[in-house]
Amino acid sequence: MKISIVITVYNYERYVRLAIDSALNQTRPADEIVVVDDGSIDGSRQIIAGYGDKIRAIFQANQGNIAAFEVGYREATGDVLLFLDADDILLPTAVEHVAARWREGVSKVQFNLEIIDGAGKRLGRSFCAFPKSYAPDDVHAEFIRSGTYIWPVMSGNAYSREFLRQVIPLSPPVGYDGALNTIAPLYGNVVTVQETLGQYRLHGRNISRNDAKGRAQRFPDFPRQIGFRVAEFDILKAHCDRKSMRVQAARPIDNEIVFINYRLASRKLGLRYVGQDADSSNSLVRRGIWLALTKTTQWRTAASHIVWFSALFLSPSWLAYRLIMLRFNRAELLRPLVRIGSVIRRKHA
């Protein structure tokens, strides 16, 4: 079995060396590492070129992340393809774990990612908090029932070439990870690795924080993100028709707690979004609390969701805005307090 790591890059000179080094320093070496530079105008190209024949570098004019993904897919030759965003990191045993779990009939292997900030500091959270038992049969049952399941962002997945061959091109609304992960259970087993095998970096340039003009925002453009997810579920419907399969949920987006959050936040901020007329703040807060109680794997997480939904629901618009700002920028806003605490601890040590 041949495993390829594909890294797509656009103006990430600050991080790309860390990503490439993490791909090179695997306990089970990848059979090839393909790096696609999508027309970077910073120092990324020079950094990539410095690796010589340790990697296969592809330099192209800027075409966007979807085109860069497709180039990486076409150029890679592995039976299994792991796509690593240039601002993320693979831990040393990632490829080893993927290879050990791979079986015939698998569409993808997914694994946990630790969340870090722009400076590489651990934020004490992960993506995702998988249930302790999340075997392929569990994933399939949840998918058929709800139209969705728990999956990580792009860097936490290794995809079967056979799966990708059947579905690419997809014309996803924003990036390939959401669309691929949404339809993966239709094309094979989804195997979950409980161990943390990578690091997902949160910083000002994450795509989820950009508006329609690519400008970084202090919190996600909720209506835009909701629209993307609705479009991904439209792709799911098309592929269900292709495979002659059905999911039981009429609106799978109602089963994803993050998008209940985005919809409630949009209403509190007076922002219009796709499907708004079918929602109310009352129905959204009830749904959010129900999902927190039935879908989360830890009671602390459930309690956190319940407190958040309740506070957001009860807050007037001006306070809701401040709560949202705090939630999506808490590491940055709390950093001065952390520093003060460190100073006090040193003085009393």
Image (cartoon, rainbow, N blue to C red):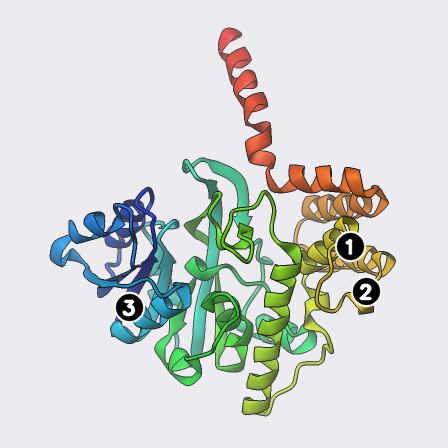
Residue 268: image location, x then y, percent? 78, 50
The residue singled out by tag 3 in the image is 3
Earlier-in-chain disc, 3 versus 1? 3
Residue at x-position 33% and y-position 53%: 93
Q: Which mark is residue 267?
A: 1
Name the side, left or right, on which 201 lies relative to 234: left
**CB atoms at circles 3 and 1 under 8 Å apart?**
no
Please state which amino acid type lies under the numbered disc 2.
Asp
Q: Secondary structure at mark 1?
A: helix
Residue at x-position 56% and y-position 54%: 211
Q: Secondary structure at mark 2?
A: loop
Q: CA distance from mark 3 to mark 2?
A: 44 Å
Q: CA distance from mark 2 to mark 1?
A: 9 Å
Q: Nearer the viewer, residue 33 or 290?
A: 33
Please state which amino acid type lies under the numbered disc 3.
Ile
Q: Which mark is residue 100?
A: none
Residue 227: image location, x then y, percent? 63, 66
- Number of residues whose C-alpha sits closer than 10 Å to that of mark 2, classed few (under 14), some (14–19) or many (20 or more): few
Earlier-in-chain disc, 3 versus 2? 3
Q: Nearer the viewer, residue 314 or 158?
A: 314
Residue at x-position 48% and y-position 50%: 206
Name the side, left or right, on which 199 lies relative to 334: left
**CB atoms at circles 2 and 1 under 8 Å apart?**
yes
The residue singled out by tag 2 in the image is 279
Q: CA distance from mark 3 to mark 1?
A: 45 Å
Tell me where residue 330 sits by quadrant. Answer: top right
